[in-house]
Image (cartoon, helix red, strand yellow):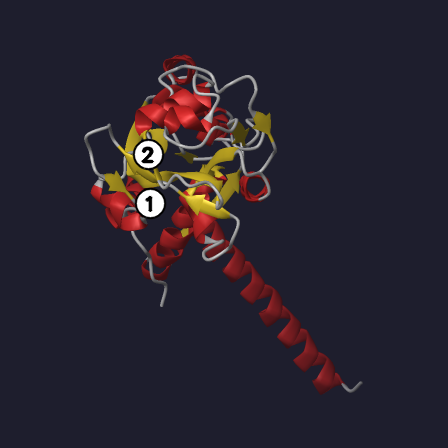
Amino acid sequence: MNRSLEMFCGAMMVLFLLAGTIESEAEDAKVIIRVRGADSVAGRVEKITKIFLKDHPEYNVIVSGGAKDIGLGALYDKTGEVAMAPRKITEAEKKEAAGRGLQLEERLIGYGGIAIIVNSSNPLSELSVEQIRKILEGGFTSWAQAGGSESPIEVVSPSPNIHAGTIHFVVHDLLENHPIASSAVNVGSFDSVIKNVANNKSAIGFTRVRDVESRHGETGIRVLKVKKDADSPAVQLSRAAIADGVYPLRRPFFLYYDRKASPEIKKYVDYVVSKGWGPQRIE
């Protein structure tokens, strides 16, 4: 290699290293926000975040979901700035946060829906909220008690070890702090709930709206209409019915962050809240 070529290669190497250093410094200069919490919230938040980042290149926002975690642990140990929760935090959780020096700000970002599903051979097409409570608590053990045929009711539930947020909502909000029937079969995931109900003529189960949406047109199950009470009209589960508040079994989704957080974090959260839980398009 001649001297000129050596000098050229050396110069290129310096430029390459310099560019890497500049790029690294540029990344370090970005506003880093780590959003942690429930996977039932993470999917939509991630979509909104991608839109946000297109117009705010000065931010680096990392969204990570987990089936059981509502993200408060990340706020506690400083590995996250924003927590995603598929339910309101409890009084005990508020006290723990306060004990750790956190003043939590709660922001509602939208609602999801709970689908009540039965086997497609079940003649019922609707139930009231009270009837659903009786069934899930174990008060009704025969379909005849809910207006159906003389056959036993078998409640199928997702595992609280996998879907803790949904179970918390069902127990504390739908069942008004009563436990799900001890005879209920815990089958793991929502996908397993759907498969079990599809193969069991006596079964009833509950899932998230997105789980039945992903199986649109699949035979074996029916999504029941739900009535607020005996005198109310039965409402078919849909995103529009959830957004309008006419579907009775809707659950709130929240973001939590420390009130002492930076203006940049608050700006990001404000953006997510402003977009809400409607369909998001990413051009």
Q: Position of residue 111 (x, y in %)?
A: 31, 39
Residue at (54% x, 32% y) in the render: 158
Q: Is residue 62 visible?
A: no
Q: Position of residue 211 (x, y in %)?
A: 47, 47
Q: Residues within 10 Å of mark 2 (few under 14, many from 20)?
A: many
Q: Amino acid at mark 2?
A: Leu
Q: Residues within 10 Å of mark 1 (few under 14, many from 20)?
A: many
Residue at (27% x, 42% y) in the render: 235
Quarter of the N terminus within the rendering: bottom right
Quarter of the C terminus within the rendering: bottom left
Residue at (49% x, 30% y) in the render: 74
Instruction: Give the farthest residue toward the left.
Output: 231
Task: Answer left or right for 41 relative to 156.
Answer: left
- Circle 1 sits in a helix, a strand or a loop, which is it? loop
In the image, residue 95 sits, relative to residue 227, either above or below, namely: above
In the image, residue 180 sits, relative to residue 271, either above or below, namely: above
Q: Position of residue 250 (x, y in %)?
A: 32, 36
Q: Which of pointers 2 and 1 lies earlier in the amino acid sequence?
A: 1
Q: Which mark is residue 188?
A: none
Q: Amino acid at mark 1?
A: Leu
Instruction: Give the farthest residue toward the front.
Output: 150
Residue wearing tag 2:
249
Give the quarter of the image for residue 16. bottom right
Q: Position of residue 124 (x, y in %)?
A: 39, 39
- Circle 2 sits in a helix, a strand or a loop, which is it? loop
Task: Answer left or right for 33 relative to 105.
Answer: right
Do callouts 2 and 1 mark residues in contact (Cβ within 8 Å)?
yes
Residue wearing tag 1:
237
Residue at (63% x, 76% y) in the render: 12
Pick the residue in front: 64 or 151: 151
Pick the residue in front: 220 or 186: 220
